[in-house]
Amino acid sequence: MAFCVQCGEILQADNRFCPACGRPVRAVMPITPHAPTKIERRRLWVVVSIVCGPVAVLLVVLMLLPSTEHPNATGSMSTSTTTTVSTCGIGRQCYIRSNTGGDKIFVFASKGALDEVQAAYTSRDAVNGEIASLMMAGQAYMVPNGTMVTVLDWSGFSGWHQVRIISPDPHTGDVGYILDQWTVFE
């Protein structure tokens, strides 16, 4: 089947002019779909193997490496001390402290508030501004080092933990979110 190059009208094989716009029709070979040949299928398989093969090998190697981190750890590349299964994990109580040298830890009231801070990671000023805004809106607060929490959820790769505050604090019983790279679990 052929089409007019000017208006797109379907042309018959014997048309010398387009019946819709009058443009002269050049001799064109009709476009017909064809099944991929054996050589094309083989080339496609080689390309897919070259691209996906190393990725699959890397994933297998990473899975076989021994891990010293908690099985539910976030996998973040932070400089924080990792925790072991015996000290903290989902459903366990542990103490938290700041990994940044401060004497308090930020707790975010919702996952949405935490996401806003993570989205502001373009600069330190942007993060500080976002945290200040969330604190003014009551969506973030601080707890002192040594606060005891129960870990409710430990994100796989996003760098956050959902915790319930259980030590004596005005926020005792509150559920909140903390950033992995700012916190050490003991």
Image (cartoon, rainbow, N blue to C red):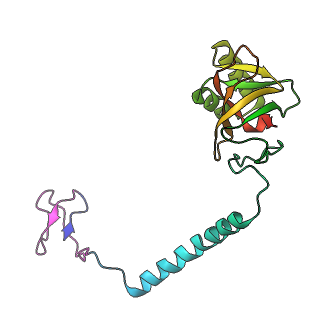
Q: Quadrant of the N terminus?
A: bottom left
| Quadrant containing the C terminus in the rendered view | top right
Prevalent SS, magenta region: loop
Does 31 lie within the magenta span? yes
Task: Count the marks.
Answer: 0
Q: Is residue 49 above or below residue 183?
A: below
Q: Which residue is drawn at the image coordinates 69% and 41% (left, top)?
A: 159
Asked if residue 88 lies in the magenta stretch, the reply is: no
Residue at 83% from the left image edge and 27% from the top image edge: 146
Vertical side of 89 occupied by 150: above or below = above
- Describe residue 87's horizontal placement relative to residue 16 as left or right: right
In terms of image quadrants, where is residue 143? top right
Q: Quadrant of residue 185?
A: top right
Residue 71: x and y in percent read: 70, 51
* Residue 186 relative to residue 22: left or right: right
- Name the quadrant containing residue 152: top right
Observer-nearest of 159 and 96: 96
Quick check: 41 left or right of 164?
Answer: left
In x, y percent, where is residue 128?
Answer: 75, 24
Out of 37 and 105, give the one closest to the viewer.
105
Identify which residue is drawn at 71% across, 67% down. Answer: 64
Question: Which percent across, then down, holds residue 151?
Answer: 68, 35
Q: Residue furthest right?
A: 101
Bounds of the magenta segment: 7-32
Left-right relation of 53 to 71:
left
